[in-house]
Amino acid sequence: MSYQQKNYDYLLGIEGLSDELLNAHFTLYQGYVKNVNSFLGATQKMIEEDDIIPIYFSELKRRLGWEWNGMRLHELYFGNMAKGGNELAKNSELYKKIIKDFGSYENWEKEFKAIGVMRGIGWVILYYDKEADKLMNVWIGEHDSGHLAGCVPLLVTDVFEHAYMLDYGIARADYVEIFKNIIDWSVVAERYSD
């Protein structure tokens, strides 16, 4: 099975992110898809040819998590953005859950933004822990580590430098602020209801 890159050209022209930045970001994402396919193909070939060289096989398998999550997190990130964004409906189940778990929407937003401007590279993710029925804002430093097992990523924000530096330089807070205006809350709410 081969993974196909998704087309996010519909985001070109979005307010707050230049087409130059988005096109560079799309190219980075395409590299993750290509590498996932390469790693899966290489390990499958070793198995089919009964030629598993442990040092090569193990490193391909270890690196797959980085490439896979790089691919999937970018899909979630691009997928929860829309031109003009839209507000989270106050009568939605997700909005009610945010109020219940954070005390207010404003409290949730303050925490999410505060995580987004922390020093370091990574991701800010609003996770839903179905087992405990709990929402959590989480910092993920690397693609392949720090994820909360069993939790569903609802809202994903890329805060690696490539997501904003071309447009905002080191002013990450400006990027985090503009990002809230391009969130497609209908997609995020759908992830919660699934």
Image (cartoon, helix red, strand yellow):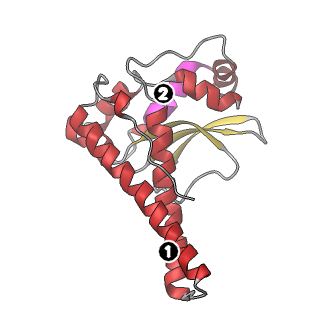
Q: Amino acid at mark 1?
A: Ala
Q: Is residue 64 left or right of residue 149?
A: left
Q: Is residue 133 left or right of residue 29?
A: right
Residue 143: percent from left, percent from top = 48, 56
Q: How many marks?
A: 2
Residue nearer the viewer, 108 or 128: 128
Judged from this view, the residue extending furthest toward the top is 91
Residue 22: percent from left, percent from top = 29, 37
Q: Which residue is mark 2?
A: 110
Give the magenta range.
104-114
Which picture quadrant has residue 117?
top left
Q: Which residue is mark 1?
A: 42
Circle 1 or circle 2, nearest the eye = 1
Query: Would residue 169 be visible to someone looking at this image?
Result: no
- Dot 2: what SS? helix
Q: Amino acid at mark 2?
A: Lys
